[in-house]
Image (spheres, rainbow, N blue to C red):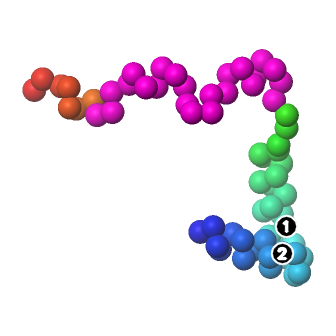
Amino acid sequence: MDKRLRNLFDFQKFEQNAELQSVIDRVHARYSARMLSDDEADQVFAAGSPDMAYLRKDPQKDDPK
């Protein structure tokens, strides 16, 4: 899939396909990059949320059936 996307973007550089450009523009509008505020950055965990380590991996495993 990654190779297919790369090929589409390479194609778009040279051909300027209007339909593909509209898809690219919609995605950029939906997922705009921006800098996080200090409050938002405090909520980001590089390795995941600390309390996620305590969740059971397999809930069925501990079920006494």
Evaluate if marks 1 and 2 touch, with contact meaning CB atoms under 8 Å apart: yes
The image position of residue 30, as x and y in percent, is 78, 46
Q: Where on the picture, by quarter, is residue 47?
A: top right
Residue in the picture at 78% in, 18% down? 39
Query: Residue 5 vs residue 16: left or right?
Result: left
Disc 1 element: helix
Query: What amino acid type should be assigned to the residue bearing mark 1?
Result: Gln
- Quarter of the rendering occupied by the N terminus: bottom right
Query: Above or below — where is 45 with respect to 42?
Result: below
Calculate the distance from the C-alpha at mark 1 to the C-alpha at mark 2: 7 Å
Q: What residue range appears in magenta? A: 36-58
Residue lying at the far front of the rendered structure: 47
In this view, the mark in front (1 or 2): 2
The image position of residue 57, as x and y in percent, is 33, 33
Residue of label 2:
12
Query: Residue 3 vs residue 11: left or right?
Result: left
Residue in the picture at 69% in, 69% down? 5
Query: What amino acid type should be assigned to the residue bearing mark 2?
Result: Gln
Residue of label 1:
21
Q: Where on the picture, by quarter, is residue 65?
A: top left
The image position of residue 63, as x and y in percent, is 18, 25
Instruction: Say which of 55 and 19 sits in front.
Output: 55
